[in-house]
Amino acid sequence: MTAVRMYVDALAGQRREALALLGWSLLEGVPALLSGRLVALAVDRGFAAGEPWTGVAWLVAFGVTAVLGAVGSRLVFRQLGAVVEPMRDALVAVVVRGVLRGGNGARSRPDAGGVARLTRHVEVVRDVTAGLLVQSRSLLVTTVAALVGIFGTAGELAWPVTLPVLLALLLFALLLRTLAARQRDLVLADERIAEVAGTVQSGVRDVVACGAQDEAGRAVAAEVDAQAAAAVRLARAGALRTLVVAVGGYAPLVLVLAVAPGLVASGRLTAGAVLGTVVYLTTNLQPALLGLAESTGSAVLRLVVTLRRLSEAATAPAPATGALVPSGSAIGVRGLTFGYGAHAEPVVRDLDLDLRPGDHLAVIGPSGIGKSTLAGLLVGLERPDRGHVLLGGVPVHEVAPAVRHRIVALVPQEAYVFTGTVRDNLALFAPDACDEDLLAAVEAVGAGDLVRGLGGLSGEVGHGDLSTGQAQLLAAARVHASPADVVVLDEATSSLDAAAEAVVERAFAERGGVLVVIAHRLSSALRADRVLVMDGGTPLLGEHGELLATSPLYADLMRAWTGPNAVHP
């Protein structure tokens, strides 16, 4: 289901709350309906008729309606949460599924871009929806109430007011498409900046090592210039919205002031009716149209563009429906080739690999070379273009999901720790584990001091309580306590120091099963039984000593890390 469909369904599912919101909106619209009429009565039947106290009484009634409107406005804002929050929760569910599965068929692991879509776009939709419910509801109620009030107070002035307002709304509708296109261009430009800058930042060591600082700077600067140009185009298109305010907000007032003297002189209108019409225009219609042009217009554009981007991010492939049961946990890789697109250069090419329980493999290579993609292929998150990955003798993506989730564990760099007790977090993949087993896993990965500092297994973990490294330690302990026989650590210890990283890797190596480490530091290669070097061609597999002699990249990386005298055994 697309994000747009989910958005509409989520709002439609709040009918009861929406009806309550409409009811309070009608109460809020009482001043817009009666304000001009009460001012006209105060003038015509009070002050102009020589009855000042009668005029004051009508103005007091005007004040009472203002109080009623304020009460309605307060209740409207209280009701907004009941309408908006369920919609927000539904969108979060859609986007999380899309990001975790590599939405829109974008064949890549969940990354910072996916997280950005979740945290930024969904919150934009929630905030914009709340603003639109306030603004559009106010526009509708206020405009209709004011026009009804004008027809009832000064019918002769109704059409000079109504026609410009309708023309303004038509102009606004005609401008929306162009504005939406410009807004979308700006959103895409923002995302391209984030993507390019994030790539440069994540690979800064490689950029410096290759002397490509100037080229990287030019790539980022080009995206910044494109974003600035998109912002200028949006600003120029947005300037046309001033026509809406000019035509719908000020033209009616000019027309009223032009024709009113003649109508009053002929006796067809009273001075109070004219003053009441001016009140309707200046306190109700003009502010409503100003809000439409300045806030509602941009909000509609942001909502349309953001929902479209969410749909692209959240359109996920169908969930795995395999039903095969593997025989053991050995991994066999034959002729594995994978690229992001039919015409893209493969990031994994012609890989053959056998991993049996007890094997410890380290995968190294420059940033962005495809190491994390390989991790996704090994655990079945990605499907190869050619070749196959077998788990226990059967294609890994055809293994029954419940079985695969029990046998295979992928620990990403972005560790997830949720609000709850330490026990709840550690037992996520082993709900039947006893406290002794959980504490044994904690001690094995070196998280004992951390857990004791949190108050033990019953200690509470809240949002923002843990550093990135501490969250990675808890995530490692969680997987260590699980029944997984195949563990892939995808830079899962990147925020730990070298000593703590070594403890975690040794704990998993001694645990048994298959261990694959996507190396953050080259020390991981020295601890592994075998090393897989990825450099853009066919990956090279071997032991440390072999690769020093056969892989110039491996030798260069080791030389840069340890010094020229430490690379040869």
Image: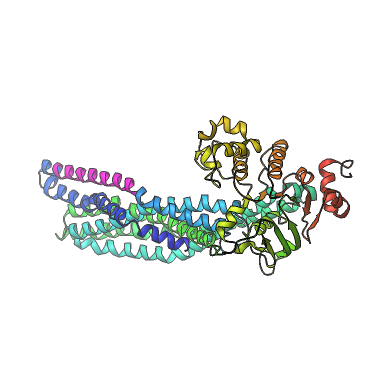
Q: In terms of depth relative to the viewer, which is nearer, 335 or 42?
A: 335
Q: Is residue 333 above or below residue 559?
A: below
268 sits left or right of 3 in the view: left
Please tell me which residue is depicted at 71% across the width and 57% down the height of the picture: 370
Q: Is residue 108 above or below residue 213?
A: below
The answer to if 499 sits in the magenta stretch is: no
Q: How many marks?
A: 0
The image quadrant where one finds the C terminus is top right
The answer to if 65 sits in the magenta stretch is: yes
Image colouring: rainbow
- For the stretch drawn in magenta, the main secondary structure is helix
126 sits left or right of 354 in the view: left
373 sits left or right of 33 in the view: right
- Name the spot of residue 385 as percent of width and height, x first: 68, 67
The answer to whether residue 445 is seen in the rendering is no
Please tell me which residue is depicted at 85% across the width and 45% down the height of the picture: 559
The answer to whether residue 68 is seen in the rendering is yes
Q: Magenta span covers which residues? A: 56-79
